[in-house]
Image (cartoon, rainbow, N blue to C red):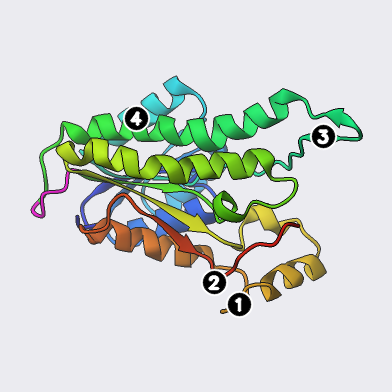
Amino acid sequence: MQVEGAVAAVFGGASGLGEATARRLAAGGAKVLVADLNAERAAAVAGEIDGAHVACDVADAGSVEAAVAAAGELGPLRIAVDCAGIATPTKLVRKGAPTPLEDFAKVIAVNLLGTINVLRCAAAAMAVGEPVADGDRGVCVATASIAAYEGQIGQVAYAASKAGVAGLTLPVARELAASAVRVLAIAPGLFDTPLLAGLPAAAREALAGSVPYPPRLGDPAEYAALVEHLVVNTMLNGETIRLDGALRMGPS
C-alpha cells in the first residue's frame, strides 16, 4: 500500500500522536481527513495540510459512521489510524469506597469500544474497494499502550482498555484477511503528547530518564513514522508493536 494518493482518516488527529500522523501521511501525498472531538483544532490542522476535517466522538456509533462517510467523499478509504484516547486515572478503591463504575466505563468506552467502532466502520468501507497493486484494500492502525502489558497502580481502566486493543488486533486481522484489509496496533511508551504536557518539568524529566535508550520522551513524529512503515510494508499484519525505547513500567 502506497501512501501517495491514498485517502486516510486519522481519528484523534487534532493533537499529539494523531496530529503527527496526519501531518506525516499528508506529507507523503495522502488525502487526510482529520477526525477529532475538538472540531476547531481539527479544522486548523486540516487547513495546514490541505486536508478535510470533521468533528468526531469515537465512542459514538453515528459519529464514526459519518466520519468514514466523509473520508469516502475524498476517494476510496485506504488508511485508518485511531489515536483517540483518554487516560483518566482509576483505582478500584478510593478513600475506602468503591470507585464509581462509570469512571471505568468512560475510559473503556473511548479507548476500547472507540477502537472497535473505528475498525468496524473503516473495515466495512475498505472491504468493498478495489485492491491496489500489491493486493491491499486497506490498512487499519490502532493505538494500544505498554500499559497493556505493565499497567501501573491507578491504571485499572486504562490498562484494561489498552490490553483489549492489543488482544483484538490478531483476531480482527484474521477476520479481515479475506478482504485484504490489514490490521495492526502500536503500543507506545512515554511520548511527549498533551497527556504529559501538564506535568511539572521535574516529573517530565524523571519520566524521560526512566527510558533505557534513548533516555527521553518519544517524539510523536516517531509514532507517525512507524504508522507510515506499517502502511507500506504489506507483510506486517495482526501485530502489536511496542514503541518504547525498551521501557518496562514499574508498579507505580
Residue 134 lies within the magenta run: yes
Residue 141 rendering spot, x and y as whole percentages: 37, 48
Residue kind at label 3, given as amino acid type: Val
Between residues 194 and 14, which one lies in front from this camera angle?
A: 194
Residue kind at label 2, given as amino acid type: Ala
Determine which residue is flagged by label 2. Answer: 246
Determine which residue is flagged by label 4. Answer: 120
Q: Is residue 75 above or below residue 133?
A: above
Quarter of the image where the N terminus is located = bottom left
Residue at coordinates 79% horizontally, 66% vertically from top-left? 203
Is residue 250 left or right of 164 when viewed as pictured?
A: right
Residue 245 lies within the magenta run: no
Residue ranking furthest to the right: 95
Label 2 neighbour load within 10 Å: few <14, some 14-19, many 20+? some
Report the disc number at residue 170: none
In the rendered image, which quarter is residue 107 located in? top right
Sequence order check: which comes first, mark 4 or mark 2? 4
Residue 59 rendering spot, x and y as whole percentages: 52, 28
Sequence order check: which comes first, mark 1 or mark 3? 3
Q: Are marks 3 and 4 in contact (CB under 8 Å)?
A: no
